[in-house]
Image: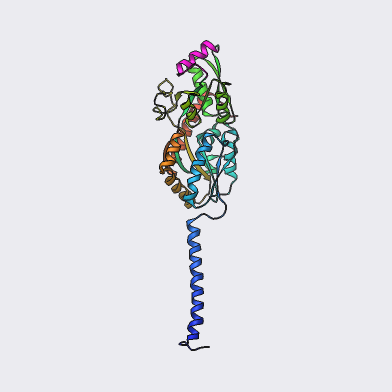
Amino acid sequence: MPPFSSPKFFLAGGTRLLRRTFAVGALLAAAGLAQAQPTGAPIRLLVGFPAGAGTDAIARTLAEKLKDELGTAVVVENRAGAGGQIAAQALRAAPADGHTLFLTHDHSIAILPLVTKNPGFNPATDFTPVAGFATFANVLAVSGATPAKTMTEYVNWVKTQKGGKDTIGVPAPGSIPVFLVQLIAKKYGIDVQAAPYRGSAPMTADMLGNQIAAGIASVPDFIEYQKTGKVRIVATIGAKRDPLLPQVPTFTELGFENLTDYPWYGVFAPVGTPQPVVDKFGAALQKVLAMPDVKKKLTDLGLNVAFEPQGQFAGRVRSYTNTWAGIIKASGFQPQ
């Protein structure tokens, strides 16, 4: 073996030292990269409604930006049907590894378990709220082919031209719009019945085709058609008028009670999802919502954009569920 001071020793030892240094450096870099970026499969963002519907457009707007914040692909996966029930069941069956999330509005989480005997999931025990990001208003709209421009004109039209009977489209059976139809019938003394569809898109198509004269859905479902006059929104849920519809009165202004809680949009994960994963997604979502172009797109879709962290959002979900549990019980509705 060459002596300690030998040039050969330094050459051989230096080479080994450099190799070890590079190896350690590579391991440290890999570890840092693993911490900075999710590994494995892309994140699936489940959506319980068809492509082209309002919820789908919202999810795709967010997914496009979230992939940059999270450093991995965020793929919108449409599991349409049963008012979001199919997507919710898919979330329940998914592993709690942070690679499957559910973007939805209130119906799938708060209302379905109240109106369905066996929904196939229990939000309280199967899901973890991640964050809320917007509220919106459910609204009553009439087809542009009808002469009605206000709630009073619609009611008078039903009484004088339809023999006091009409059908109002709703996006799903057992949904909040179904109960709104019942409240409208009771208040105005008209025989209006809810016609359930498989989502708001086919319902709106029938309104545009003058197959039905009226429908109840969210502002995002109607706002573009409202702008062109193809539908006319005549009443909105909420404590105050919608900023996008300042000329449209609230149901409260029209004399309805207990219709001030806004529906919401949020993201859920399977129960047991590690808290750091939940926190990371929530932080990324908050950053995305602060982007001017994203906020404008969502606002133009009819949303009131406001990030709600996990705890605050969970409280909103509980309160909203309790409010509608009382309304549904008072209606006499029996879970199907």
Give the colour scheme shown: rainbow
- 258 displayed left or right of 76: left
Q: Does 128 lie within the magenta span?
A: no
Q: Give whichever of 199, 16 is nearer the camera.
A: 16
One can see residue 250 in this view: yes
One can see residue 128 in this view: no
Q: How many marks?
A: 0
Q: Residue at x 54, y 32 (%)?
A: 114
Q: Residue at x 53, y 11 (%)?
A: 161
Report the quarter where the C terminus lies: top right
Residues in magenta, as a range: 145-162
Residue 192: quarter of image: top right
Residue 259: quarter of image: top left
User: Which secondary structure type mostly characterizes the magenta part of the structure?
Assistant: helix
Residue 29 image point, x, y percent: 48, 64
Residue 60 image point, x, y percent: 52, 41
Residue 59 image point, x, y percent: 51, 40
Q: Give whichever of 238, 59 is nearer the camera.
A: 59
224 up-or-down from 92: above or below = above
Q: Residue at x 48, y 51 (%)?
A: 70
Residue sticking out furthest to the front: 228
Residue 47 image point, x, y percent: 55, 39
